[in-house]
Image: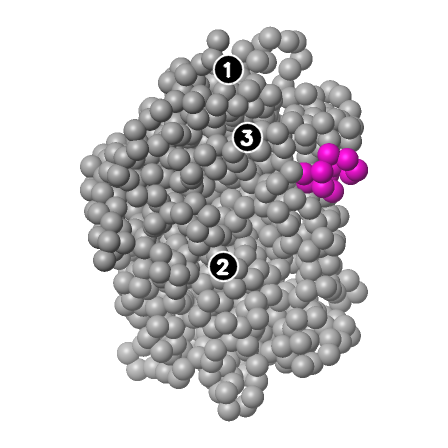
């Protein structure tokens, strides 16, 4: 199939062919999930950072990601009511809105994006990686579902390095807790060669993902590595890593991006091909999902392309060289978890963002600070100052939330962005040099 | 001469209010080569620091007397107060005598603060101290032993001396004694809270975060003896347990307000480091192994810790209510505190099942307006009395 730009639905946004393909993959996955009671498939809920999809597949378990469910609820404008439902039930207004969206959705019948009820998980794989909230989230789900819960702790990479003690700890957890419990829940015996095969496939797709993300270095960039990037990371951060589907998708996407690059075209936005690339940005932090398209529009209308982002590294920092390694299967899974963006120390995050500004020849850094995500947000003001100091490029700060529509103030965000673009312009022309 | 409770409490309040940590500075200045290692809540094995001849210094934020000027520039409005006041303490030079800072794994904010400290104070040793959230000896235990050995190596470098097993075992004995006294004070409070009010006990225990442990144990003994000896009026208060204050500490006025509104606070989770390990840690054999065993199998429960057993979730609170004879629980959580606020609904469900009444409110370490809290707590106490009378 030749990649092309397709009008998905009458009146709907324009999408790349790859976006359509991605959407179909995600839809098929949700059908697998909601059909689980009929097919007899067993379901494991887990998280995107520290997602062990290859391991789950070894036990024929279907991967359910509550964060992705919350994102889907956000995109479909349903998360607001779910969050309020959870708050009415006693959950604080101060805490993570992914959690409240998930719990509210559960209270309202747990209806997935395909309009069907999501199954109860057979097991919760609490991969405690880069986010404290995960720990409490699955304690909350365990209270409701009363199903086996496997705890996997990923030590924090506070000193910028992975120590042997960290790897040994994780591998021990795999061998002595995670794998035996998954065997018990699924009734499937663990086969390490099966895992090796999945990891081999993962690495193949990871190569293509890195190639795609790094096309942002081109002037002009054929991709938007934040808004578009969210589509790109969907399969590999979700339930497709280690599958042939993922290999096919990233190959297809690579061809599509190559074609745009050859023609010197920019990314495809919901309103059609991007016009002139006026600003090249690096973005730190997750996006807002409840007004995703409106948010994106504020960028592309101003000719701003995101050439690199940290959010597309929450499910793995492949551009820093990591690949799943079939020759060291469990160690490799450990290294994968340890390396995800939110498990990296603040100094490491500053290094990454500064590198991105320089290597992608960006005009500046924009931080989208998320109210309910302390893992990302705590320390971002220091990150901003430090990256600005190191690169000499202007940085700006906006505040929104993941899936809580109450914390997306469009006028405020637009104002700040417009001011920021003016600042970048001035800086470029030398007028802001003294600022 | 025997000291009175008010004399002891006055000294402790002086230490509490001193945001320049003069007592710790004086300790350091008294002998050349002395070192001070700061740590944040919730738990650090202070025995390891003490074994290196160094002073562990608990830094619990800036309280309600610190004007935060610089710290606010580092944090968005939706992040709790303790990291911004801790940054303030650092930037304003109030902890410039500290030779190292330890950031225990509590939550993402304190975790990220460890990295910020590295950036802001590159010349001072700082470490994020990861603890296991899995509790099997061969898994979490081995990891924790490895982490403690890494910390010991760093501490040896800072102190400039080898820290032997004997050193650590001696320190364990000293901290065992201190924990026994802290627990004795808690037991006294539970039994006769009018003799040792929570606001006093808080100050007495809090002094232990700044003073050398040996001096603090003497002070605890003095206070307990004085509190037992004095006759104080019994009030018509209700016994309550407060929970959720394990990291950012409440202003002293908040504790006093609870007492004024009719509560006897008979158990709490203030400054958990003082009684994190339950019972004595053995003082012979491999001390790091013994500390790991105590952490894995005999330590307190709190929201910052994973509970692997659903049946056990929240039971610590029910036990605290039963053991102290409390009539209700007050959930007092810091605004924007992920661990406490995410945990709260689960703990409340456990209390509902056990028919324990509760209320909830939020605070910050610099909360100044106590009237709403007094009214809420007062109403809670009234309703407890009505229910129990029914």
Q: Secondary structure at mark 1?
A: helix
Q: Is residue B299 visible?
A: yes
Q: Position of residue A356 (x, y in %)?
A: 54, 47
Callouts 1 and 2 close, C-beta under 8 Å = no
**Pointer 2 chain:** B
- Calculate the distance from the C-alpha at mark 3 to the C-alpha at mark 2: 28 Å
Circles 1 and 2 on the same chain: yes
Instruction: Identify the magenta region.
Output: B281-291
Most foreground residue, A44 or A79? A44
B286 within the magenta span: yes
Q: Which mark is residue B181?
A: 3
* Image quadrant in which the C terminus of chain B is located: bottom left
Q: Earlier in the sequence, mark 3 or mark 2?
A: 3
B55 within the magenta span: no
Relative to A63, residue B34 above or below: above
Closer to us: mark 1 or mark 2? 2
Left of B299 or right of it: where is A270?
A: left
Most foreground residue, B16 or B388? B388
Q: Which residue is mark 2?
A: B313
**Pointer 1 chain:** B
Q: Which mark is residue B23?
A: 1
Residue count near mark 2 (Cα–Cα under 10 Å), binned few <14, some 14–19, many ≥20: some
């Amino acid at each position: 199939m030749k990649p092309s730009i397709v009008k998905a639905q009458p009146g709907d946004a324009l999408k790349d062919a790859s976006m359509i393909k991605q959407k179909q993959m995600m839809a098929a996955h949700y059908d697998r999930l909601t059909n689980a009671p009929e097919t007899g498939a067993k379901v494991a809920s887990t998280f995107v950072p520290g997602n062990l999809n290859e391991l789950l597949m070894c036990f024929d378990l279907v991967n359910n990601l509550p964060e992705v469910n919350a994102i889907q609820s956000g995109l479909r404008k349903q998360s607001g009511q779910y969050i309020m439902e959870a708050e009415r039930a006693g959950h604080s207004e101060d805490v993570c809105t992914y959690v409240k969206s998930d719990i509210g959705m559960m209270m309202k019948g747990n209806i997935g994006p395909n309009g069907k009820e999501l199954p109860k998980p057979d097991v919760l794989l609490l991969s405690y990686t880069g986010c404290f909230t995960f720990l409490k989230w699955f304690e909350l789900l365990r209270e409701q579902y009363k199903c086996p819960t496997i705890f996997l702790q990923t030590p924090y990479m506070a000193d910028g390095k992975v120590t042997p003690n960290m790897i040994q700890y994780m591998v021990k957890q795999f061998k002595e807790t995670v794998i035996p419990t998954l065997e018990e829940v699924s009734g499937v015996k663990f086969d390490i060669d099966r895992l090796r095969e999945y990891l081999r496939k993962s690495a193949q797709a990871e190569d293509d993902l890195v190639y795609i993300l790094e096309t942002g270095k081109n002037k002009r960039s054929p991709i938007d590595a934040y808004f578009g990037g969210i589509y790109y990371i969907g399969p590999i951060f979700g339930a497709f890593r280690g599958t042939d589907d993922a290999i096919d998708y990233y190959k297809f996407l690579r061809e599509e991006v190559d074609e745009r690059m050859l023609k010197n075209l920019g990314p495809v936005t919901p309103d059609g091909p991007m016009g002139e690339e006026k600003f090249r940005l690096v973005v730190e932090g997750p996006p807002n999902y409840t007004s995703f398209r409106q948010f994106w529009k504020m960028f592309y209308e101003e000719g701003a392309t995101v050439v690199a982002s940290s959010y597309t590294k929450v499910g793995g920092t492949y551009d820093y060289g990591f690949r799943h390694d079939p020759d060291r299967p469990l160690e490799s899974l450990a290294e994968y978890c340890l390396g995800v963006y939110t498990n990296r120390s603040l100094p490491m995050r500053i290094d990454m963002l500064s590198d991105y500004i320089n290597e992608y020849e960006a005009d500046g850094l924009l931080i989208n600070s998320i109210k309910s995500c302390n893992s990302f947000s705590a320390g971002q003001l220091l990150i901003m100052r430090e990256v600005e100091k190191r690169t000499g490029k202007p940085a700006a700060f906006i505040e929104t939330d993941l899936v809580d529509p109450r914390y997306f103030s469009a006028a405020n965000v637009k104002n700040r962005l417009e001011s920021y673009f003016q600042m970048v312009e001035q800086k470029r022309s030398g007028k802001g040099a003294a600022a | 001469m025997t000291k009175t409770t008010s004399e002891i409490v006055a000294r402790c309040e002086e230490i509490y209010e001193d945001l320049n940590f003069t007592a710790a500075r004086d300790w350091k200045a008294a002998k050349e080569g002395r070192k001070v290692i700061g740590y944040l809540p919730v738990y650090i094995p202070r025995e390891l620091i003490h074994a290196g001849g160094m002073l562990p210094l608990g830094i619990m934020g800036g309280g309600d007397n610190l004007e935060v000027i610089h710290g606010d520039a580092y944090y968005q409005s939706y992040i709790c107060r303790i990291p911004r006041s801790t940054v303030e303490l650092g930037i304003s030079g109030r902890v410039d005598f500290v030779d190292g800072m330890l950031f225990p794994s509590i939550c993402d904010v304190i975790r990220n603060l460890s990295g910020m400290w590295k950036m802001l104070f590159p010349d001072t040793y700082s470490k994020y101290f990861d603890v296991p959230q899995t509790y099997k000896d061969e898994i979490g235990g081995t990891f924790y032993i490895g982490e403690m050995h890494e910390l010991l190596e760093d501490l040896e470098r800072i102190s400039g001396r080898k820290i032997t097993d004997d050193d650590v075992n001696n320190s364990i004995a000293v901290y065992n004694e201190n924990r026994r006294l802290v627990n004795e004070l808690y037991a006294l409070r539970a039994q006769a809270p009018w003799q040792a009010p929570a606001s006093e006990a808080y100050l007495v225990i809090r002094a232990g975060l700044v003073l050398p442990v040996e001096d603090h144990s003497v002070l605890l003994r003095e206070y307990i003896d004085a509190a037992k000896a004095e006759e104080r009026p019994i009030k018509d208060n209700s016994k309550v347990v407060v929970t959720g204050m394990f990291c950012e500490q409440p202003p002293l006025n908040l504790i006093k307000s609870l007492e004024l509104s009719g509560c006897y606070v008979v158990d709490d989770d203030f400054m958990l480091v003082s009684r994190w390990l339950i019972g004595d840690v053995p003082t012979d054999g491999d001390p790091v192994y013994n500390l790991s065993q105590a952490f894995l199998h005999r330590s307190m429960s709190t929201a910052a810790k994973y509970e692997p057993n659903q049946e056990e979730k929240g039971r610590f609170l029910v036990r605290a209510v039963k053991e102290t004879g409390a009539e209700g629980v007050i959930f007092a959580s810091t605004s924007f505190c992920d661990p406490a606020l995410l945990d709260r609904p689960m703990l409340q469900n456990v209390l509902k099942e056990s028919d324990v009444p509760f209320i909830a409110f939020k605070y910050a370490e610099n909360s100044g307006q106590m009237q709403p809290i007094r009214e809420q707590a007062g109403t809670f106490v009234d309703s407890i009395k009505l229910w129990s009378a029914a």
